[in-house]
Image (cartoon, rainbow, N blue to C red):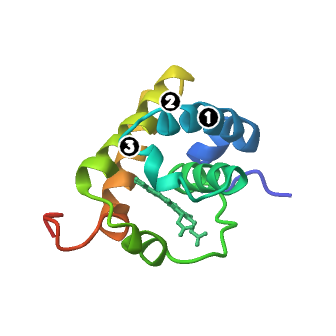
Amino acid sequence: MTVTEETAPSHYERIGGAASVKAAVALFYDKVLADPELVGYFAEVNMAEQRRHLALMLTVVLGGPNEYAGRELAEAHQPLNIPVAHYVMVGEHLTATLTELGVPADIITDVQVVLEKVQDQVVAQGRGTGA
Ligand code: HEM
């Protein structure tokens, strides 16, 4: 067994893996669904699906294992017509969640970079994404 792997632990591993993601999901979920601007998107999505969504989202942005076998981000989100402002709000809830849970600042910075990278897939195209 080699212990000289060149790859650094992922942020997902650094924050404590699945258990920590689960804790973050609970807090993130509360914030997103308490936001009157955002709750409507999830109105027709059941509770289990919502938790699944948030867990997947967090795992993806933290560089954790991609166990996701569903639709591409664009395919899932383009029909929702999500404006940039709402995307930004979700990102802010995520940042606040990670900050409250004591996640290191360098990880939060990288999460924000990932959020920028996937923004065009999630946000409705043709609404001034700056592309
Ligand atoms: C980095 C940002 C995001 C990621 C990685 C992400 C990830 C995902 C994933 C993996 C799914 C499941 C797709 C499927 O099951 O086929 C999904 C669905 C969904 N997402 Fe997101 N999401 C993001 C941002 C957002 C935002 C900003 C909103 C709303 C403001 C949102 C609302 C939804 C809704 C309502 C669904 C269910 C769609 C449906 O069942 O038709 N997501 N998202």
Residue drawn at 40 percent across, 44 percent down: 90
- Residue 126's spot in the image, x, y percent? 17, 73
Quadrant in which the C terminus is drawn: bottom left
The reply to whether dot 1 and dot 2 touch (C-beta < 8 Å) is yes
Q: Which element is circle 2 on? A: helix
Q: CA distance from mark 1 to mark 2?
A: 7 Å
Rendered view: 90 above or below 75: above
Q: Earlier in the sequence, mark 2 or mark 3?
A: 3
Q: CA distance from mark 2 to mark 3?
A: 10 Å
- Residue 71's spot in the image, x, y percent? 56, 77
Residue drawn at 74 percent across, 44 percent down: 18
Few, some or many C-alpha atoms within 10 Å of disc 2 (few <14, some 14-19, many ≥20)? Answer: many
Rendered view: 16 above or below 38: above
Few, some or many C-alpha atoms within 10 Å of disc 3 (few <14, some 14-19, many ≥20)? Answer: some
On the rendered structure, is 14 left or right of 97?
right
Q: Earlier in the sequence, mark 1 or mark 2?
A: 1
Location of residue 128 by image quarter: bottom left
| Front position in the image: 124 or 16 | 124
Q: Which residue is mark 1?
A: 24
| Front position in the image: 25 or 110 | 25
Q: Which residue is mark 3?
A: 91
Indicate the amino acid at tag 3. Answer: Gly
Indicate the amino acid at tag 1. Answer: Ala
Q: Which element is circle 1 on? A: helix
Residue drawn at 67 percent across, 43 percent down: 13
Q: Which residue is mark 2?
A: 97
- Residue 92's spot in the image, x, y percent? 36, 36
* Mark 3 residue's CB less than 8 Å from ligand 1: yes
Number of numbered markers? 3
Residue 55 badge = none
